[in-house]
Amino acid sequence: MSAFEEESSSDEEITLLRKAVDVELPKNFDPTKVPENGTEYLHLVMYEAKRCKQWVTADIDANKIKEPTLKVDLIDNCEKAPQQMIPSIHWQKEKLKAFTDLRQFLEKHASENPTKYYNREVIEKIVDADIPTFEQINTCIQSTKLDILQYILNKLDEVEPGETIKYEHGVWLYAVLATIGKPLSPHTCHCFRELARKCSKIRSKLSANANEDSYTPLNLFICIVSRYFSQLDLAD
């Protein structure tokens, strides 16, 4: 794992959530010692968690499996963009820092009991019309944010080759990404991955001399999904 990937890993992201138990690993921690109280047990859990890999994979020989099973092929990663459109690591670090700072700010001012629900008709009306206000996104329940995300994902399929995401849709997407709760549910993770893939597809269909404003938002969403939400196989 690169230094960049380590910087965007769980240690920094955990601070975005309110701590249920404020415990830090002591400098003189001894992992061989048997825990004698709840605090020491939490220290051991933290120590073991830091040693775990983000994910593991296994190579399975399907020919050796005798029992009936279902084989699922992985979807291809993001489509590669022309070299001049691929963002630098420095650019991605800057955008992740700004995104993390925004998440921390919004988390401090988040509504403790969001109750607002929008049906599909309302979502179509407000998302296509204008950018979101802080009150709109702050008071939305989680399911409404996912419905907004899904609506925009569907609209991305309508983007013609050579065109890019609408400004209003981009702002709504950024607001959803900045306020969605963690840890991600499997469905939310799937939607985020679809977002990155669709952005890469739109980007790949831009002309080689496309204006920077056309692909910068696409780069941003790919960066956030892959680097911040740890879908690194989709990263540029």
Image (cartoon, grey):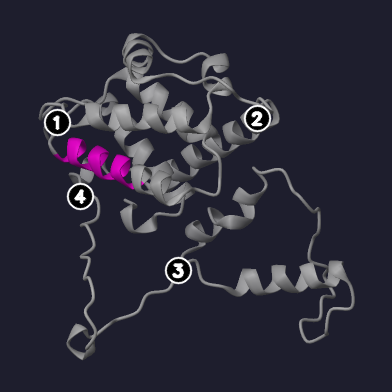
Q: CA distance from mark 2 to mark 1?
A: 37 Å
Q: Is residue 18 magenta?
A: no
Sequence order check, earlier mark of 2 and 1: 2
Q: Position of residue 81 (x, y in %)?
A: 20, 45
Taken as a whole, is the magenta stretch helix, strand or loop? helix
The span shown in magenta is 193-204
Q: CA distance from mark 4 to mark 2?
A: 33 Å
- Which of labels 3 and 1 is toward the front? 3
Observer-nearest of 120 and 163: 120
Q: CA distance from mark 4 to mark 1?
A: 16 Å
The residue that mark 3 highlights is 55
Q: Position of residue 216 (x, y in %)?
A: 32, 32
The three-letter amino acid code for the residue at tag 2 is Phe
The residue that mark 1 highlights is 209
The three-letter amino acid code for the residue at tag 4 is Lys
Q: CA distance from mark 3 to mark 4?
A: 24 Å
The residue that mark 2 highlights is 105
- Which of labels 3 and 2 is toward the front? 3
Residue plotted at (16% across, 40% down): 204
- In this rendering, position of residue 33 left or right of residue 174: right
